Amino acid sequence: MRLHEVDLSPTTLALAKSGDGAALAAFYAACAAPAYTVIRRIVPGPAADDLLQDAFLDAFRGLPRFRGDVPLGAWFRSIVVRRCYMHLRSPWQRSRDWLGDLLERLDAAPAAAPAGLALDLERALERLPPLTRLVVWLHDVEGYTHEEIAAATARTPSFSKSQLARAHARLRAWLEPEPRGACAAAAPAMPLEESR
Amino acid sequence: MNHDDDQETVARALRALPELAPPADGWARLARRLERGAAGARPASARPAVALAIAAATLAIAALALWPALERGTRATPAPAAAPAADEAPELAARSAGLERLLGALPPARATRASTAQTAALLEDRIALVDERLSSTADESLPPAATEALLRERVALLDSLVRVRAAESVGQTL
């Protein structure tokens, strides 16, 4: 189940809003895996564990103000996405990500996707620049519109559209094996679904 | 296959990725933090900042001690208009990494003058812009000289940011 589809019973929700420990645990149990998936896809690496914790703490603090006009999971997802975005936009994190990406390119780019060998989809996703990865995941998996992405990232819908188009082009290039000689040139591209 | 089909194929493959299991001790950690009183607790993702804050005074002074060496390194950088030496990118990246480490070691500013904050924000924005240009050229066949020019610009901007941050840190530490 996707995070935005998760909901709690009215009774459990009411208890959680009052700070009941068992109800908060039920909230965690229902949302932890889908929330962690969103976070890890957007922020690969060890920071994801802490971001999950912080997102839940934000949610627990904000629960009394939750009006229930959308499923709890949809409300929580906006908190998760905000946490991820705040993490990505921090100057230090941005620089670290950029530097890691650069060093990888300097050291290993020619060997990263040798002819005839496709990257798997998870690795290809991780290889995208952080903000681009956020845009791709929100649009393609979470179903955000470009306007919603623009609002979540303080950018314009055009920025979201261009990032998405370039990301798709990159992902396809990384996922499809390059022709290796005449035989490879005649071979069909590896379908994305089978590339993992 | 047309453009829309391509996009949908990628999107469908992403949606088919498996759900990931959260850390096994996730709830136990969260419960402990709730018990301690989350209101007074810093976000888990900000924990490194706590360590930095503890070492603030020492590091600010260390930054000043290191400054001459860094300055020499930066001044040795050719002017942007000059033709870059071959394979200069790794060296620029290493210099950039050194400045990043120094920047990361400086304590976070608690309070600062508006003009200083504005300067730092401007520098950070310009660094972000350079990063974006570098990132967007990752898969384009940009000439090495152009990449190196961007890297050199980044080193110069980081250099300035370190100066601003170091001055700021020393100002609040002493």
Image: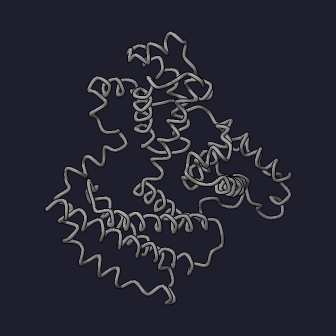
Which residue appears at 52% of the width and 25% of the height? A31
Looking at the rendered structure, the number of numbered marks drawn on it comes to 0
**Residue A38 % position (x, y):** 55, 37
Which residue appears at 85% of the width and 52% of the height? B2
Q: Is A7 rendered above or below residue B96?
A: above
The outermost residue toward the bottom is: B82
In the image, B102: left or right of B5? left
Residue B144 visible in the picture: yes
Q: Is A101 rendered above or below residue A190?
A: below
The outermost residue toward the left is: B174
Q: Is B88 rendered above or below residue A123?
A: below
The outermost residue toward the front is: B114
Quadrant in the picture for the C terminus of chain B = bottom left
**Residue B1 % position (x, y):** 86, 51
Residue A170 visible in the picture: no
In the image, A173: left or right of B29? right
Answer with the quarter of the image where residue A1 lies. Answer: top right
**Residue B123 % position (x, y):** 41, 68
**Residue B132 % position (x, y):** 55, 64
Q: How is the image coloured?
A: one colour
Pick whichever, B2 or A123, lies toward us: B2
Pick whichever, B169 or A46, lies toward us: B169
Answer with the quarter of the image where residue A34 lies. Answer: top right
Which residue appears at 26% of the width and 46% of the height? B50
Q: Is B41 rendered above or below residue A12?
A: below
